[in-house]
Amino acid sequence: MSLNLVPFVSVDKMMKLVLHIGIERVLMDLAAEIEADFRRWPQFDKTPRVASHSDVGVIELMPTSDGTTYGFKYVNGHPSNLRRGLQTVTAFGLLADVATGYPLLLSEMTILTALRTAATSAMAARHLAPKDARVMAMIGNGAQAEFQALAFKAICGIEEVRLYDIDPDATDKCARNLAGSGLKITRCKSREDAILGAQILTTCTADKNYATILNDNMVGAGVHINAIGGDCPGKTELAPAILHRSSIFVEYPPQTRIEGEIQQLAADHPVTELWQVITGETAGRTSASQITLFDSVGFAIEDFSALRYVHGKLAATGLYDNLDMIADPDDPRDLFGMILRAAA
């Protein structure tokens, strides 16, 4: 690939790439890539995402580097977009070579973020959830729901997903899309119905407010909670009492304390970083009665892993276009002359 031509993975090419490899295979591959990068967590530059908040949503930049490759993601979160027929989350991302600063990849990340979020959830649950968990409640059946269901099936062995959303059409959409997946799909009429018999409780709602999707009396001993909807200041899903009863695991505490469920707690409330569980530095689930909570807000290293995974698939699949993004004058000092010669 020429240095001045940057590989670009469009939405069309991303969809073709995912279907070429297989959705569940991609989810398993991404989980492996993300886990491998969590195992070398100290090597990465880490900073909370740079966020620009408004009354209607947030626009964020999520950067990181391992010293060899740099990556960032642009992402928004606008819950009110749904009423306009628009996506609530859109994203794109870039990889660059640290040695030269030249871009290596530009990619859509709306689809890729959905995939990496689900892969991260299931990867965390593999370390934290009860080993015999076969039933998951999926509360909030929007754009992320099917990805979560398939990731937990492929990575954790989930066999049944119990669906609930305040909008029955969302549940119908999710059930329809998961037909033929091999999962038992149960439509539920309430949150309480959805959690019956479930060992894993996934909450994934979009409204930007302090919501109570799970009340304290809804959460019994021994479950794993995968809380992914609370991902910005002022947006939560769990009753505070649940947090006080749970062992809480997070990606990057300085970010999660601002954006996650733990924004409801004192700043010194103890949490465990997930990478320490993955590397064996600290324990994850320690008893059958323990409530484990993955307070997931999404972190830049996960996007880095996903972009690097996609970049590694380009040569074999050819599923990319080249963008003429980088000026390439014959003499690197003569950028002005390059413009003049273009007129000839």
Image (cartoon, grey):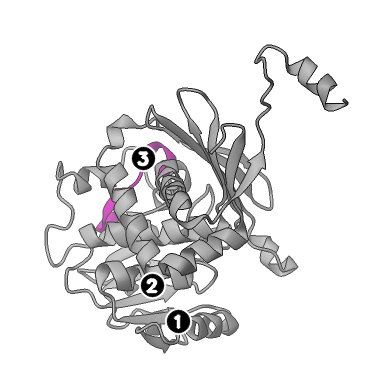
Q: How many marks?
A: 3
Question: Is the residue 214 above or below the residue 78 in the image?
Answer: below
Q: Report the residue marked by disc 1.
A: 178
* Quadrant in the picture for residue 282: top left
At label 1, the amino acid type is Leu
Whether residue 153 appears in this view of the structure is: yes
| Residue type at the position of mark 2 | Leu
| Residue 254 inside the magenta-drawn segment | yes
- Distance from Cα at disc 2 to Cα at disc 3: 28 Å
Q: CA distance from mark 1 to mark 3?
A: 34 Å
- In the visual, does 54 lie left or right of 13? right
**Is the residue 316 above or below the residue 95 in the image?**
below
Q: In the structure shown, which secondary structural element does the residue marked by tag 1 occupy?
A: helix
Q: Pinpoint residue 18: horizontal percent, then vertical percent.
A: 47, 64
Q: Which is more toward the observer, 320 or 344?
A: 344
Decide which of tag 1 and tag 2 comes sooner along the chain: 2
Mark 3 packing: few (<14 Cα in 10 Å), some, or many (20+)?
some
What span is colored magenta in the figure? 241-257
Give the residue pinned by disc 2.
150
- State the image coordinates of residue 227 (x, y, percent, origin top left): 39, 60
Determine the secondary structure under disc 3.
helix
Q: Are marks 2 and 3 in contact (CB under 8 Å)?
A: no
Neighbourhood count class around disc 2 (C-alpha, 10 Å): few under 14, some 14–19, many 20 upward: many
Q: Is residue 122 left or right of residue 222?
A: right
Q: Which residue is denoted by mark 3 in the rendering?
A: 253
* Amino acid type for the residue under numbered disc 3: Pro
Residue 215, image x, y percentages: 39, 69
Q: Which of the two residues, 221 or 23, is positioned nearer the viewer here?
A: 23
64 lies left or right of 287: right
> Label 1 vs label 2: CA separation?
8 Å
